Image: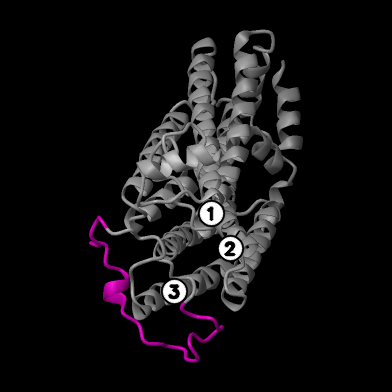
Amino acid sequence: MNSAPITSIHTQSKIPATLHNNTHTHSDSTNSTGFTLAQCYKMLALAAFLLAFVVVGLGAYTRLVHAGLGCPDWPGCYGHLTWPTSQQEISAAEAKFPETPVELDKTWPEMVHRYFAGTLGLLVLAIVTVSVLNKKSNAKSQQPIKLPFLILAIVIVQAAFGMWTVTLKLWPQVVTLHLLGGFTTLALLGLLNIKLNQERLFKHFSNYPASDLPQQPNVKIIKRLSIICLLLVVTQISLGGWTAANYAALPCHDFPTCQGTLWPTMDFKSGFNITQTIGPNYLGGQLDGPSRTAIHMSHRIGAGLVFLFCIPLIILLYRQPFLKSSAVILLSALTIQIALGISNVVFITPLPVAILHNLFGVILLLSLIFCLSHLLYFKKFNLQSIQSDKNLSPRS
């Protein structure tokens, strides 16, 4: 007797019956501890995501003002919980670390970055705790349980890389991996927030009539191109990290040429030598001009490849009504990032531009993750729709 009204709702809204069931199960727990923990889980995940953005920005600032070795020890600074400020404390610190005189304009950025990163670690630990409690109190909860543990593991590794960045005196391999770890943490926190709010994506799909939703072959093409673009952006971020770690942002002051030519003198073998010895102080870099030029030009070539592959993807996304928002976000992030990259060269890396270039690198990465999440959840939405139709159809 009840099948007709359910069929009517499904036809009008396109929301699968299975999703209605999941939503109903969730709403039944509104008065239970599980609902409170679920809401707390979402709030903590959002707070951690926003804080991770700040940490990435502070990391970029610390690196760009050459404050990576502002404190020669770890986790304190010249043996202090914060950093030495009085003349007596500074004299004692310089006596203890005679090779590294105290520079207050470099000590505070390093320690502020450490404290924000430490706070992020505690917040991620809280997320793990709440996710476990939420799962125990509501076994039917669909909220992620494994992803928070992965993020916590990466944050712990990040802390180790933060220590090695100091103790190994900005060894480029460690600096690059530390930067990649920060971007990975932020990207995974973004993915966690998407997963925690997946019902919004389902509602997003349900707002479109069946005629506006793409056929499966089109979705597959867009998904494959999105994965290619994602891999290219990850590679480009890695090149950017290697560029920053080896202070290779300044060999070229002109664009689109470099040193007045399209193909300057370069030494790729030395530029990408990952067997650099541990021991020297790498502040300011140890490579010669041709090696840094090779790194810089590789980063430029990577940017060109990202552009060439992302433009067709943006066009394909824009042609699908339910993916237009992804197209606009991706185009905006790509355009701004390229403009910032060119400005870095032409205006010789002004600090605000260089920091924004770091931040928009991760925004571009998040844009592609957002796009892929739309495609993956659309597939899940489609499968639930098909399953729902089978359940609603009369049995023969």
In the image, taking residue 224 as reference, residue 395 lies left or right, namely right
Q: Is residue 52 above or below residue 128?
A: below
Q: Amino acid at mark 1?
A: Ala
Question: Which residue type does callout 3 highlight?
Answer: His
Residue 187 within the segment the image draws in magenta:
no
Tag of residue 60:
1
Q: Secondary structure at mark 2?
A: helix
Q: Amino acid at mark 2?
A: Ala
On the image, the x and y values in percent for residue 321 come to 71, 55
Q: Earlier in the sequence, mark 1 or mark 3?
A: 1
Within 10 Å of disc 3 (Cα), the crowding (few <14, some 14-19, many 20+) is many
The answer to whether residue 54 is above or below residue 347 is: above
Q: Locate residue 355: give its quadrant.
A: bottom right
Dot 2: few (<14), some (14–19), or many (≥20) neighbours within 10 Å?
Answer: many
- Work out whether residue 2 or residue 91 is closer to the camera in this orientation and state it: 91
Q: Is residue 127 left or right of residue 31?
A: left
The Cα atoms of the two marked residues, 1 and 3, are separated by 18 Å
Query: Taking 48 as reference, is 379 above or below it?
Result: below
Reading the image, the residue beneath label 3 is 296
Magenta span: chief secondary structure: loop
The residue to which callout 2 is attached is: 354
Magenta stretch, residue numbers: 251-279
Find the distance from the CA under tag 1 to the CA under tag 2: 8 Å
Dots 1, 3 in contact, CB < 8 A: no
